[in-house]
Amino acid sequence: MTDSSQQKQDQTRRTVLAVDNLQTRFMSRGPALKAVDGVSFSIGEGETVALVGESGCGKSVTAQSLLRLISPPGQIVGGHIYLEGDDLMTRSQSEIEDIRGNRAAMIFQEPLTALNPIMTVEKQLAEVLHRHHPQRRKEARAQVLDMLQKVGIPDPEGRLRAYPHQLSGGMRQRVMIAMALLSNPRLLIADEPTTALDVTIQAQILELMRNLCSQMGTALLLITHDLGVVAEMADRVIVMYAGRVVEEAPVRTLFAQPAHPYTRGLIQSTPNLATHQGQLVAIPGLVPTLADLGDVQGCKFAPRCSMATDKCRSEDPPLQTLGPDRAARCWYADEVMQTVSAQA
Amino acid sequence: MTAFILRRLLGTLPIVLIVGIITFFLVQLSPGDPAMFYVSADAPPQEIERVRTQLGLDQPVIQRFGFWLGEVLQGNLGISFHQNRPVLTGFLDALPVTLWLAFFSLVIALVVGIPVGLLSALRPNGLVDKFSTVFALIGMSMPNFWLGMLLVLLFAITLGVMPAQGYDPTSFWTGFRSLLLPAITLGYSQAALVARMTRSSMLEVMRQDYVQTARAKGLRTPVVLGKHAFGNALNPIVTVIGLAIGSLAAGSAVVEVVFNLPGIGRLVVDSVMRRDYPMIQGILLLTAGMIIVINLLTDLLYAIIDPRIRYD
Amino acid sequence: MNTRDFGINRLSVLLGTLALAGAAQAATCEGVYGGELSIAGPLSLVTLDHMAITSEPTAPRNAVYEQLVALDANLVPQPALATSWETSDDGLTWTFELREGVRFHNGQELVAEDVVASWERYSEVGARRFELEDIDRVEAIDDRTVAIHLSNPYGALLESISAMSGAWAIMPANIARELGTTRADRAEQVVGTGPYKVHTIVPEGRTTLRRFDDYTMHEGEASYNAGARCAYFDQVTYTHISDPSTRVAALLAGEIDLAIQVPGDEADRLINANHTQVVPTSPGARVYFKFNVAEGPFADYPLLRDAVRAGLDTEELMAGFGPSDYWRANNTPRFQEPQWPWIDQSHHFPQDMDLAQQLVDESGYQNEPIRFLVVPGGATGWEKAPAMDQYLRDLGLNVRMESLDGATFGSVRQNLSSWEIKGAGGGSLVGLRYLDASGVDRNGNPWPNLPDGWHDVLERALNTEGQEARAAAAEEFYELHAEFNNELWTGDVFFIVGANSNLRNIATDDSTASFWNIWREE
């Protein structure tokens, strides 16, 4: 698949998820912490979008906000989340619960802790069907078996009565995927699904997710900090920094020609992507905590940016459209793109 | 599992034996003379000496210990000085009251403590949580006997709807009526403890990923809390219940005296007061054994609740 | 042979009463019959063996068993199962005539052989048989005549055989022999001649008595353990409620009719409730402190004992027991009239702090530590001990109060090196045993430095013929006792009986809460 054909397909695809100006805050004794600060993006049917950024950039909170899984002191304070055109923000709690695990499902990072340790695999899977398709109760076991087979679990019958601790890490994540896909969701949100697994298993799981999603036409939102995974999996990439989208681009474009100094820093600090340059470059400074951000004037990345000017430190840049499917939040996006090209 | 239970039961024997030895010397070497209670504190010394001989107290304590141990190993706990009948008979006479009392107290502790704990965990620092904090604080700081006296004043004397004291075993209903106020007295502080433990355990569990998973599956809140969160929160609660049974055994001494219930608690207090050595030793030995068995059951319960725990 | 202890007038009254026995009986029981009486007391009742034990509640046993003679409220022995008695000139043989037609609860008729068999058992198991160690043997002369043969003359024989507890109870010969040294714990083993018979005994639980319909009434006004006894209630139950507040609560809640030993500070609750009453009963407990006169400062500096006596405000001290109706300090007239002749009533001292301080200075006291033993629940327990502690401090004594449980207290006090002063208490009606015991420590050893003539006077008080002569000897003994000053009497505290207001005729002269003449009137 080439970039261009992919992009063409995207435009013809129906949009599954559209997020508009999402704002999630954590209420604290001081000023509210803006964990997600006006994030907008969309995903089409069958498309894989990667949401990347360092820990604490707000990508996981964004993912949880999409299914309204944020619990106090967190709170979604603004924006819209459209799932196939339905605005989830206007839905009641009960309606949201009907959607979760059904039209939109989620996979979590740590497969051991994400599965209930005191329930068998079968119970945890069948529960989803009982909840969302009570009329198909009788077929539940067959469906569960079928799905376990699809996610590549050997001897699925034997695993039905297993408890999570009796399975290996990879098996557990397969069970999680099976659980998420049981209701044939339109959207699958995978929050760092392979971080806890070792490298060989990672590749298998990613492969599995990609295959199943494309078979079922499920839109996949992949949350990760691992650009290697992004390069492997994503059609499009959204880079987040300090609760905001700082760059958005199709995957190849992004790696070939990042438009934001932060994106460039991320790429340069990733080993297998950076090897051709012969050296790894760390992004100086620390990821700011949410509490610190209130004090930053201008561009939130400026304190860590080698290119920062006085303008950067005083004026907050908007997310500028740089082309089809491309945007970056930097006053000097063009210069950044050129320097990277020159280096290449 | 069976091997584990057998091993544990065998393991209890030395513990019970050690409890027995400590109890024996603690009881026999503490000041006080049973003979004074057997006749009269004002009886002349030679008369008290005669009774001491009659009770076998004139022999050296080591010799008495050897004799006692020999009898205990044969299953004979001896004859109560005061009751003049086998210790076991006196113990078994008093046991049902105490068991019922412990049972009702535990039911109260669980029926009140768990829902209050759940509701507080649902909205930490909410109204229910604040109320339950005060409820728990009072429960844990108010002495049993004081609560008992207040309950008697209100329900038995002022309103006249409950008995003030005593145990009427005529039927289950009369027995239940006799034990309700004592059970509340005894169960309240345990309910407070269970509520606090349920709350903290639930808050801990609700932060876990699998609860997030359960919510992401679209499960209704009661199912998420009741099935996924509470099931996992149970272990610390079971621990507290196990400990509560120990406290119930101790608390029943006070409550049985205040409510005049002819149970083990009152019997042990009275026996200590009159230095009824065989009775004290027998009760402590049997109670220790019972508490050890309860601990074993608690451990077995862990394995039932949590499949990760296996005893092999 | 001569007849003693009864003046001629008294004897004729007695004979007259006997002649009219049938009529008198009907006339004395004028209350309302029927119903059930529920009593609660502080001690657990596991047996009704009247011979073997003293520490159990005495009233149920005295309702079931009777003795040859019974004490009246003045502690004068009156006829009970024996209607008259004579003493031989040498004072070594006492002959008792038994009452006619008396039946045991099992239907057997009382005969002299029963008295003999009862004595034989009592001499084996009797808790107070040491008082009767002068008895050589008891002989059945005929069915209705019993002779007691003494090895030495014993003037207080009647008082000793009428003891209220650990007593020579009369039981059927076959049962006495069958029991032997076994304690009579089972209901069918407890058979007496009293107005109530045992129905059930639940150890540590409830003891139920029922009226004995064939009871043979004794002549005379009901007085303490003597005189007419009318069993008005069909059934009497005794329950053990050890906690005093619980007893009061049970009474207030209407669950019991009679609560023995109500604490003074709870009496108001019963007075204020409209369905309960309180009855202060005498004799209560005699409240005193005992000095260790064998070792330590009170032995080394006898003047220190006088100092403490002078530094004490007994009235203030006694106020710790609650409303003033329920105690008497030793500086007020005694509650009960006429007096039991052997009661010390002459030696009170008004408080005089200057004198007390002067005595401390003169005594030679060098600030040695003074350990003050207290037992909770005793007559000198928590209510009074802190006040006493303060008085001793006010005198500048280096005092340390130690509060011990009853059993520990009982042991510690035996060790004369472990205390200097201790709380004490005992029956207010002190008798010969008390006089005897005041001269010895808890190990039975005589206190050092007893005044000259102590034992001689005591011997005379015990064995002089005639109660008045003995009372005079006792009076003399008290002089010595006061001079010795090893005990500091502060007053009497009365036992408060709490009762339902519908009970009538509760004896005020009986702190054991005897119930045989009580009836209920709605």
Image (cartoon, rainbow, N blue to C red):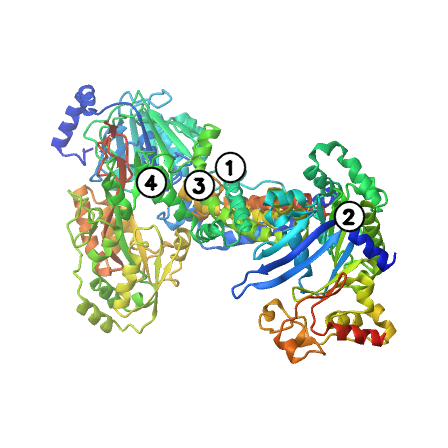
Specify whether C379 is left or right of A152.
Answer: left
Same-chain check, marks 2 and 1: no
Same-chain check, marks 3 and 2: no
Is there CB contact under 8 Å for labels 3 and 2? no
Residue C446: percent from left, percent from top: 33, 57
Q: Which mark is residue C249?
A: 4
Q: Amino acid at mark 3?
A: Pro
- Rounded to the nearest whole Å, what is the CA distance between mark 2 and mark 1? 59 Å
- Rounded to the nearest whole Å, what is the CA distance between mark 4 and mark 2? 74 Å
Mark 2 lies on a secondary structure that is loop
Mark 1 lies on a secondary structure that is helix
**Tag 1: Cα neighbours inside 10 Å, few (<14), some, or many (≥20)?**
some
Mark 4 lies on a secondary structure that is helix
Q: Chain of mark 1?
A: B
**Tag 3: Cα neighbours inside 10 Å, few (<14), some, or many (≥20)?**
many
Q: Which mark is residue B100?
A: 1
